[in-house]
């Protein structure tokens, strides 16, 4: 039994080393963002920022220079992502409930249509959606970003929640119905509270999609004060020359922050979400 | 009974209504509207336009940039598939029984929470030809430094490496879940029969992971054909046209240079058709032998 143990330890060490290398790019971003401009390009690469400075954060967050409005973009991204989360969770939960727990004509057709739509590439609907949003007068507005982002995640949300609703035991619903509760009351007072874990998983998924989406806001917004973070960051890059990676990396680190927090708090939940989505695909 | 049934149907559709509206207006309608636009000469800002039949499609056949971008996209999809299948699978196999499983899973998953722009900027900096750490360490190991993103021979590979780093964590979680679902008794029985690690992998693990592999390949290929953000940030499609992909070309045609919505819509539908054909083919190919 000795050999396998040595093997296990070696494997763990190798994996640990690989994990360190795996994190290196993001650590490098953080380290760079905290260095003095003069220290950033120094070789050999220094992995400990010393002396530490917050000047790059201050610059991208508060200075109004050129396109660098990361502070404002951060706020925009929060509004957009949270708005999309609310719409996706509400509409997907309402749609998934009857699909999972009621029998009615057209149910299978609706569900097949929604699941089939997961195969439609977002890039394919880009131009016509732009025309539509333009006709609605929604270009460079929050709703023009929130509603299409929500529509992109809706079908997946229905799929994820339906999987969960299907497995719920029916006794509680039955009991509530006998007590005279109507469908809406059963849904909002019994089903939803019991579904908190999966709703949280969907909320995180929707937040991630909207927070990180790049292509749609790139075309749907043409006023700098309405840019969400990814667009502002991509433009920040062209605003600064390659000698000043500091502000760019400060912006990149800021963009990673909310999901890093969510990730540390709810690691297990995220993994569950991926697990369910992946296995039944 | 029929009356109760009718009421239930009405209730069901009331629940479905908000979501289906959202879905119909922002997902289904644009899909069909795009098909219609692809037969017109619509442009941004042009109030009226005519139907011009298949002209946009025949034009694409002569558009060398489109052809090049198709090949680049196909190259990317093919060349990235093996690492996307293998890297997370190897990690999953190594992590599956290990002590630090959950912590390490978290580490490898983390890049997937980042936006494509953040990922692109990080790698742009890492791969910087002059002051980037990657080239520095290469030189320290005695290997030649290169301008990875400015060299047509390596630019696409740099984009592939970036993408693998970005999405490996996602597929790792999918694989780990798949591995958990394989009954342990199978491995115990194989061990009793004296089968080694390699045999067990080829005769038990891989065949039973087939549905998961299918999911990974199909998801990845659908995603590959739409690659845009990495290219936009890392190379802008260059050097020359070496990394220009279909969606990038579509974006430029519709929103940057020419504002030709009709042509761009035709591109989108060609892309859609290709993705559909590939998905169906893969389902056929990989599902063929699931019976055991």
Image: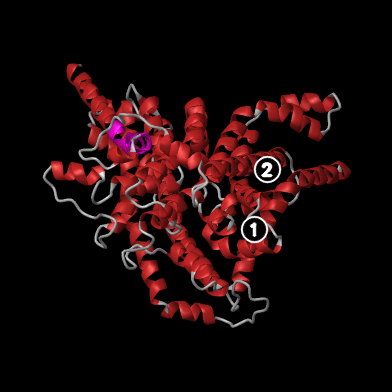
Instruction: Identify the chain of the residue marked 1, using the numbered disc in the image.
Output: A
Image coordinates of residue B12 in percent, x first then y, are 77, 44
- Measured as percent of width and height from the top left, residue B178 is found at 42, 36
Residue position for label 1: A139
Q: Can residue A121 be seen in this view?
A: no
Distance Cα–Cα, label 1 vs label 2 = 19 Å
Q: Where the N terminus of chain A falls, by quadrant?
A: top left
Of helix, strand and loop, which one carries label 2? helix
* Chain at numbered mark 2: A
* Residue at screen point 51% across, 25% down: A265
How would you classify the magenta stretch by its main secondary structure?
A: helix
Looking at the rendering, the stretch of residues picked out in magenta corresponds to A19-34
Q: Residue at x 11, y 45 (%)?
A: B142
Question: Does B53 sit left or right of A25 as displayed?
Answer: right
Residue B86 horizontal/vertical position (percent)? 31, 44
Q: Which of A186 and A242 is in front in this view?
A: A242
Mark 2 residue crowding within 10 angstroms, few (<14) / some (14–19) / many (20+)? many
x then y, percent, for residue A36: 33, 36
Q: Mark 2 points at which residue?
A: A87
Q: Which mark is residue B51?
A: none
State whether residue A63 appears in this view.
Answer: yes
């Amino acid at each position: 039994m000795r050999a396998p143990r040595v093997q296990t330890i070696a494997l763990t060490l190798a994996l640990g080393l690989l994990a360190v290398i795996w994190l290196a790019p993001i650590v490098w971003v953080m380290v760079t963002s905290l260095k003095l401009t003069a220290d950033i390009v120094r070789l050999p690469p220094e992995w400990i920022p010393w002396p530490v400075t917050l000047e790059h954060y201050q610059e991208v967050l508060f200075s109004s220079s050129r396109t660098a409005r990361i502070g404002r973009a951060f706020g925009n991204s929060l509004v957009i992502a949270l708005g999309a989360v609310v719409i996706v969770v509400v509409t997907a939960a309402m749609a998934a409930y009857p699909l999972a727990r009621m029998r009615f004509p057209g149910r299978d057709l609706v569900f097949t249509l929604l699941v089939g739509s997961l195969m439609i590439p977002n890039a394919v609907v880009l131009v016509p959606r732009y025309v539509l949003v333009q006709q609605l007068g929604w270009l460079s507005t929050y709703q023009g970003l929130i509603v299409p982002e929500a529509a992109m995640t809706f079908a997946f949300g229905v799929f994820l929640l339906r999987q969960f609703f299907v497995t719920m035991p029916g006794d509680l619903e039955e009991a509530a119905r006998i007590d005279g509760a109507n469908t809406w009351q059963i849904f909002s007072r019994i089903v939803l509270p019991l579904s908190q874990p999966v709703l949280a998983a969907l909320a995180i998924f929707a937040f991630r999609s909207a927070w990180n989406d790049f292509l749609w806001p790139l075309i749907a917004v043409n006023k700098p004060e309405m840019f969400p973070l990814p667009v502002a960051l991509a433009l920040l890059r062209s605003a600064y020359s390659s000698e000043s990676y500091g502000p760019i990396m400060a912006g990149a680190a800021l963009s990673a922050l909310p999901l890093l927090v969510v990730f540390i708090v709810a690691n297990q939940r995220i993994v569950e979400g991926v697990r369910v989505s992946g296995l039944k695909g | 009974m029929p009356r109760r049934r009718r009421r239930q149907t009405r209730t069901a559709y009331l629940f479905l209504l908000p979501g289906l509206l959202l879905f119909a207006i922002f997902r289904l309608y644009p899909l069909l509207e795009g098909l219609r636009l692809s037969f017109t000469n619509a442009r941004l800002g042009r109030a009226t336009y005519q139907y011009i039949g298949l002209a946009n499609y025949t034009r694409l056949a002569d558009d060398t940039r489109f052809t090049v971008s198709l090949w680049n996209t196909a190259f990317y999809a093919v060349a990235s598939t093996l690492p996307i299948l293998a890297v997370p699978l190897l990690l999953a196999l190594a992590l599956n029984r290990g002590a630090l499983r959950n912590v390490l899973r978290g580490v490898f998953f983390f890049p997937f929470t980042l936006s494509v722009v953040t990922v692109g900027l990080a790698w742009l900096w890492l791969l910087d030809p002059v002051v980037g750490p990657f080239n520095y360490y290469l030189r320290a190991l005695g290997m030649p430094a290169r301008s990875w993103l400015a060299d047509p021979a390596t630019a696409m590979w740099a984009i592939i490496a970036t993408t693998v780093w970005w999405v490996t964590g996602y597929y790792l979680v999918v694989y780990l879940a798949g591995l958990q679902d394989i009954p342990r008794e199978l491995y115990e029985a194989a061990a009793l029969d004296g089968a080694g690690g390699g045999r067990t992998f080829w005769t038990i693990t891989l065949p039973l992971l087939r549905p998961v592999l299918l999911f990974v390949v199909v998801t990845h290929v659908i995603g590959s054909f739409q690659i845009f953000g990495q290219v936009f940030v890392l190379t802008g499609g260059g050097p020359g046209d070496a990394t220009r992909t279909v969606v990038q070309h579509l974006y430029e045609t519709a929103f940057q240079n020419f504002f030709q919505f009709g042509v761009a819509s035709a591109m989108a539908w060609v892309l859609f058709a290709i993705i559909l054909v590939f998905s169906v083919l893969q389902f056929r190919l990989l599902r063929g032998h699931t019976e055991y």
